[in-house]
Image (tube, rainbow, N blue to C red):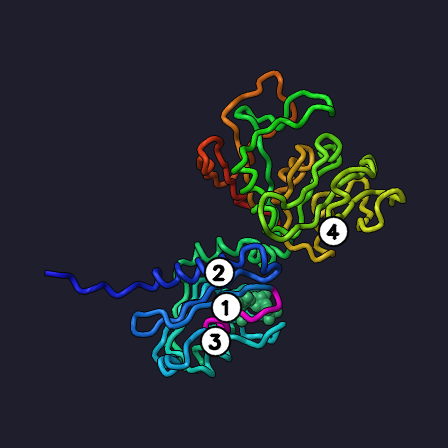
C-alpha cells in the first residue's frame, strides 16, 4: 500500500521564499531581502527575489517568471512572500496593486513591513480587493533575515553588530610590540566567513588604537561581495596618513579636528572630542550608512555596550587561553546567547542579541 503524497504546507513554500530572498544577501541595502513563490495546484509556477535596491521587488520577478502557458492559473494561485507586499510608490510601483491587477487567488505573508509608507496598507489593499491574506507564516525566520532593515525602521537608526575574536579567557591580543603580527584567533575558514559577513554591511568601524596596532585594510578579500565603507574613529587625530585603511575605497574619518595630511578621497567628519556612541552613529546615519559592524578595539566596543547601542554581538572564541600574556580583555555582553562550534570545529562562535537596544 502506498500513501498518497501529503499536500505541502505554507511553511514549506515560505521556506523556499526565504531561501530565494537570501540569494541577494549583501546587495539590497537599505532595502530588505524579500523572496516570493507562486504556487498553483500544489506546484511552484513562479519564483523571484528582490535583487538590488532600486530594482523590481520580489513579487514582480515572481509574476514575470510564470510561463505564459500557466498564467491562467494565477486566479487560483497562492503567492508566498516573506515581507508584506508594498503599497507605495517608491523607486518602483506598489506590489499589492500589481497582485490585485493579476487577480491572484490568495497571499501568504511572512512578516509585516514596518516601513511607515506600507505598515499594514499592503495587506489591507489585498483584502479590500477580496484576496484572502494569511500573515505570520515563519514570521521569526522572516524577521531574522531582515534584522538590518527592521532595526532601521523600528529603532530609527542603523543596525549595529559588535564583532571581535578572543582567546578562551577573553583577551583580544597578546602583549607584543607593533613589529609583531596581531594574535591570530581566526582560522582560514572563519576569516572567509568574516569577510562574507563584512560584505553584508554598509560600514565597518574601528578605533584609532586598532588602526595603529594592527594596520587593518578592512577590505572584503577572501570572499566576493560589496566593499563596505571603512570608518575610523580617531578623536585625537593620532592615526598616521600611511595607514592602509585610508587606501580602502569610501573611507570615513571621524575626528575632533580636520586633517590636511590625509588622502583627499577620505571623507572627514568633525565630531566633538567627547562624542558619544549615539553621536557617532548619527554622523554615520547622515551619510546614509544603514548598517555598521564595529570590529574593535575594546575601548570603542565597550563604549557601545555601555550605551546599549548595539543589536547583535558575534564573538569568535579560540580554544586556547593567553593568561598573563593577554591584553585588552572583553566581557561577553549580557543578552540572549547562542553558542555554536565554527564550521571547521576549531573555534566557537558566540552570538548575543541585545534584549534592550537603544532606539533613536
Ligand atoms: C516588497 N517586495 O521585494 C521589497 C519591498 O524604493 P522601492 O520602490 O524599492 O521601495 C522600497 C520599500 O519597499 C522598502 O523600504 C520596503 O518597505 C519595501 N520593500 N517590498 O513588497 C520587495 N524589496
Ligand atoms: Zn513591492
Count of residue discs: 4
**In the displayed structure image, the side of residue 290 where residue 340 appears, left or right:** left
Residue at 60% x, 41% y: name it. 162
Residue at 56% x, 47% y: name it. 196
Q: Position of residue 291 (x, y in %)?
A: 63, 52
Q: Residue furthest right?
A: 260
User: In the displayed structure, would residue 133 be above or below residue 24?
Assistant: below
Q: Position of residue 114 (x, y in %)?
A: 54, 63
Q: In the rendering, which numbered label is found on residue 330?
A: none
Q: Sequence order check: which comes first, mark 3 or mark 4?
A: 3
Magenta residues (range): 53-62
The residue that mark 1 highlights is: 58
Q: Is residue 35 magenta?
A: no
Question: Is the N terminus in the top left, top right, bottom left or bottom right quadrant?
Answer: bottom left
Q: Sequence order check: which comes first, mark 3 or mark 1?
A: 1
Q: Sequence order check: which comes first, mark 2 or mark 3?
A: 2
Mark 1 close to ligand 1, CB under 8 Å? yes
- Packing grade of label 4 (10 A; few <14, some 14-19, many >=20) is some
**In the displayed structure image, the side of residue 15 where residue 145 appears, left or right:** right
Q: How far is disc 2 from disc 3 in space, using C-alphas?
A: 16 Å
**Circle 4 — which element?**
loop
* CB under 8 Å between discs 1 and 2: yes
**Circle 3 — which element?**
helix
The residue that mark 3 highlights is: 64
Residue at 77% x, 43% y: name it. 246
Q: In terms of image quadrants, where is residue 172?
A: top right
Amino acid at each position: 500500500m502506498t500513501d498518497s503524497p501529503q499536500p505541502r504546507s505554507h511553511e514549506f513554500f515560505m521556506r523556499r521564499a526565504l531561501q530565494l530572498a537570501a540569494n541577494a544577501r549583501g546587495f539590497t541595502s537599505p532595502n530588505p531581502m524579500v523572496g516570493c513563490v507562486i504556487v498553483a495546484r500544489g506546484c511552484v509556477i513562479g519564483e523571484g527575489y528582490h535583487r538590488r535596491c532600486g530594482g523590481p521587488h520580489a513579487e514582480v520577478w515572481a509574476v514575470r517568471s510564470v510561463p505564459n502557458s500557466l498564467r491562467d492559473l494565477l486566479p487560483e494561485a497562492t503567492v508566498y512572500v516573506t515581507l508584506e507586499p508594498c503599497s507605495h510608490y517608491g523607486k518602483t510601483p506598489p506590489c499589492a496593486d500589481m497582485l490585485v491587477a493579476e487577480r491572484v487567488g490568495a497571499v501568504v505573508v511572512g512578516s509585516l513591513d514596518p516601513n511607515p509608507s506600507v505598515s499594514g496598507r499592503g495587506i489591507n489593499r489585498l483584502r479590500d480587493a477580496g484576496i484572502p491574506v494569511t500573515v505570520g507564516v515563519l514570521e521569526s525566520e522572516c524577521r531574522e533575515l531582515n534584522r538590518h532593515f527592521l532595526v532601521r525602521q523600528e529603532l530609527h537608526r542603523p543596525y549595529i553588530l559588535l564583532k571581535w575574536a578572543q582567546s578562551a579567557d577573553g583577551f583580544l591580543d597578546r602583549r607584543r610590540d607593533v613589529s609583531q603580527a596581531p594574535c591570530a584567533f581566526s582560522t582560514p575558514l572563519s576569516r572567509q566567513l568574516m569577510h562574507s559577513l563584512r560584505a553584508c554591511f554598509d560600514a565597518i568601524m574601528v578605533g584609532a588604537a586598532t588602526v595603529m596596532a594592527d594596520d587593518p585594510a578592512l577590505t572584503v578579500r577572501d570572499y566576493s561581495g560589496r566593499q563596505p565603507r571603512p570608518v575610523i574613529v580617531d578623536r585625537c587625530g593620532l592615526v598616521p596618513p600611511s595607514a592602509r585603511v585610508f587606501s580602502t575605497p569610501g573611507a570615513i574619518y571621524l575626528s575632533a579636528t580636520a586633517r590636511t595630511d590625509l588622502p583627499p578621497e577620505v571623507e572627514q567628519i568633525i565630531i566633538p572630542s567627547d562624542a558619544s556612541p549615539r553621536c557617532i552613529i548619527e554622523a554615520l546615519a547622515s551619510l546614509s550608512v544603514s548598517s555598521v559592524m564595529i570590529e574593535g578595539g575594546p575601548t570603542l566596543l565597550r563604549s557601545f555596550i555601555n550605551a546599549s547601542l548595539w543589536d547583535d554581538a558575534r564573538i569568535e572564541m579560540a580554544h586556547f587561553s593567553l593568561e598573563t600574556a593577554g591584553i585588552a580583555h572583553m566581557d561577553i555582553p549580557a543578552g540572549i546567547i547562542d553558542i555554536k562550534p565554527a564550521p571547521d570545529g576549531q573555534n566557537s562562535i558566540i552570538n548575543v542579541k541585545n534584549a534592550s537596544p537603544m532606539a533613536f
